[in-house]
Amino acid sequence: MPSIAENIVLVCERIRYFEQQYGRPAKSVKLLAVSKKQDPGKLREAFAAGITDFGENYLQEAQVKMKQLSDLQLVWHFIGPIQANKTRGLAEHFHWIHSVDRLKIAHRLSEQRLPNESPLNICVQVNLSREESKSGTTLEQATALCDVVETLPHLKLRGLMAIPEALSDKQQQRASFADLAAAFHRLAPDYACFDTLSIGMSNDFEAAIAEGSSMVRIGTAIFGPRTN
Ligand SMILES: *Cc1c(COP(=O)(O)O)cnc(C)c1O
């Protein structure tokens, strides 16, 4: 089995290749390593191979890793569904939240961010496939939510995030990303720091980069399958 370091080299090479292939500026796509359900030792390996940004889905699990890795300069991104009773922990421990999908959560995160910390970076999560089971606001409601996040004092609106339904066909993957990218470009001029389109996972990051992703969230292709 290839090592984590070898996987990272491979994923980075593919990202750079797709940037070129689809006419994107070099290094315009950032790699976020999704480390949910992976042991802290594996994050340490990834850090040694150049990864600084990690994505986590569960607050308690993330807090354990943050303690164990506190000697490293890491940027922590929360990408999982948000329960209202977890917002304080998220506001206090993370640098980015990609999964804000309702007003109540946005207000709580701003109120609970410590005022001496830099504003919490926020992406609004859009539910592209309108699947009942998935979190995310509709594209239509995303504008209203972005307008509010932009005005909250301890939040910094950075962009949009989506997890489309799992499709294996690249053209179908591109079609759903294209809707989000269009909304992203329509909204961007209205906000001060709206620079992040958080799309693309292990199985669809080529399509995401083709449609303008600026941050891909890769787990399996770096760490291998999640076992527990
Ligand atoms: C787990 C997860 C990923 C990574 O998925 P892989 O298919 O393992 O690359 C990306 N984004 C979110 C929101 C996730 O929950």
Image (tube, rainbow, N blue to C red):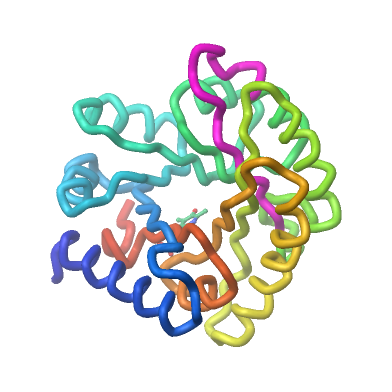
Query: Foreground: 2 or 187?
Result: 187
In the figure, residue 166 lies in which quadrant?
bottom right
- Residue 221 among those drawn in magenta: no
- Kindly identify the residue that appears in the image at 67 percent across and 41 percent down: 192
Vertically, is 109 above or below 2? above
How far across and how far down the image is residue 142, in percent?
78, 50
Q: State which quarter of the image contains the N terminus.
A: bottom left
How far across and how far down the image is residue 48, in percent?
15, 48
- Residue 126 among those drawn in magenta: yes
In the figure, residue 39 lies in which quadrant?
top left
- Kindly identify the residue that appears in the image at 68 percent across and 50 percent down: 135
Query: Foreground: 155 or 98?
Result: 155
The residue range painted magenta reads 110-127
- Kindly identify the residue that appears in the image at 50 percent across and 72 percent down: 209
Query: Foreground: 70 or 152?
Result: 152
How far across and how far down the image is residue 2, in percent?
14, 70
Q: Is 40 on the left-hand or right-hand side of 177?
A: left
How far across and how far down the image is residue 16, in percent?
35, 73
Vertically, is 217 above or below 210? above
